[in-house]
Amino acid sequence: MAEHTDNRLIILSPDDTIGVARCGIEQGEDVVLAGQSVQLATAVSMGHKLALRPMAMGDKVLKYGVSIGSATAAIAVGDHVHLHNMKSDYTPTYALTKDGKIA
């Protein structure tokens, strides 16, 4: 990303649509995503993903500059991106339990 993004996030490619949290970030905290200040609606744990760009249902979620999954719902800038709003391109969804673990 050419624009400033919070240093609590790791961005691995300029094409990424998500940033990976380097530490836990609490609900209500402000983060800067691509130059835009956003207040988090939910807490995000270390290693989890935040949306850097808006995504529509069906859009590819990009990490490392490649698709890691597809949005299963609309995702706004700053949203926590996880099993509740994306499906993996690596693990078939039929192989996941309700809590997201591999069956």
Image (tube, grey):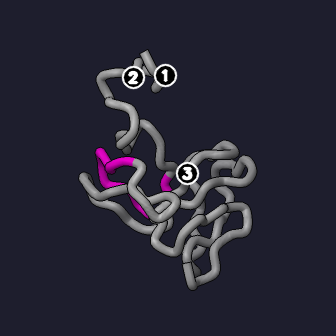
Among the 4 quarters of the image, the one containing residue 86: top left
Q: Regarding mark 3 in the picture, which secondary structure is present there?
A: strand
Residue sitting nearer the eye, 48 or 36: 48
Q: Is the magenta region chiefly helix, strand or loop? A: loop
| Disc 2 target residue | 96
Q: Is residue 95 magenta?
A: no
Which amino acid type corresponds to the residue marked 1 in the rendered image?
Lys
Q: Quadrant of the C terminus?
A: top left
Q: Which numbered marker is on residue 28?
A: none
The residue sitting at 72% across, 47% down in the picture is 24
Which amino acid type corresponds to the residue marked 3 in the rendered image?
Lys
Q: Are marks 2 and 3 in contact (CB under 8 Å)?
A: no
The image shows a total of numbered marks equal to 3
- Magenta residues, as a range? 69-79
Which amino acid type corresponds to the residue marked 2 in the rendered image?
Leu
Residue 54 picture location, percent across and down: 38, 65
Residue 72 picture location, percent across and down: 29, 45
